[in-house]
Amino acid sequence: MEINLSFMQSVFLISLELSEETASLLTLDSMFEEVEGWDSTGHMRIIMEIEERLDIEFEIDEVVGVDTIEKLIVMTKNKL
């Protein structure tokens, strides 16, 4: 599975219950708290969705400070 913007848009669509239109507007530079629902609780839902889809687990220190979609992609690729 390719870990890219499209993958993350689908993760955000499900985990934050975004509309398809809103999810399609996300970019690599989209930032924590600038995206509807991407707050601390939403962050954990995003992480859990990634973990479930890819059958991986992140440590807490890996997810702290990950505040853009690009950083989510890099973090996920580093775990695979």
Image (cartoon, helix red, strand yellow):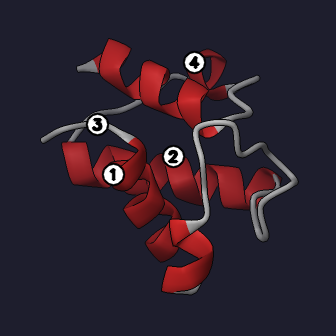
Instruction: Point out which mark residue 47 bears.
Output: 2
Q: CA distance from mark 1 to mark 4?
A: 19 Å
Q: Earlier in the sequence, mark 1 or mark 4?
A: 1
Q: Quadrant of the C terminus?
A: top left
Tell me if label 3 and label 1 are in contact, CB under 8 Å. yes
Q: Position of residue 34 (x, y in %)?
A: 86, 55
Label 2–label 4 contact, CB within 8 A: no
- Badge 1: residue crowd in 10 Å (few <14, some 14–19, many ≥20): some
Q: Which residue is mark 1?
A: 7
Q: Write the residue at 51% across / 22% down.
A: 59
Q: Which residue is mark 4?
A: 62
- CA distance for labels 1 and 2: 13 Å
Q: Residue 17 — which label?
A: none
Amino acid type of the residue that numbered disc 2 sits on in the rendered structure? Ile
Q: Residue at x 79, y 70 (%)?
A: 36
Label 4 amino acid? Answer: Glu
Query: Callout 1: helix, strand or loop?
Result: helix
Sequence-wise first label, 1 or 2: 1
Expressed as whole percent of the image width and height from the top left, the position of residue 50 reads 38, 48
What residue sits right under mark 3 in the picture? 3
Q: CA distance from mark 2 to mark 4?
A: 10 Å
Amino acid of disc 1: Phe
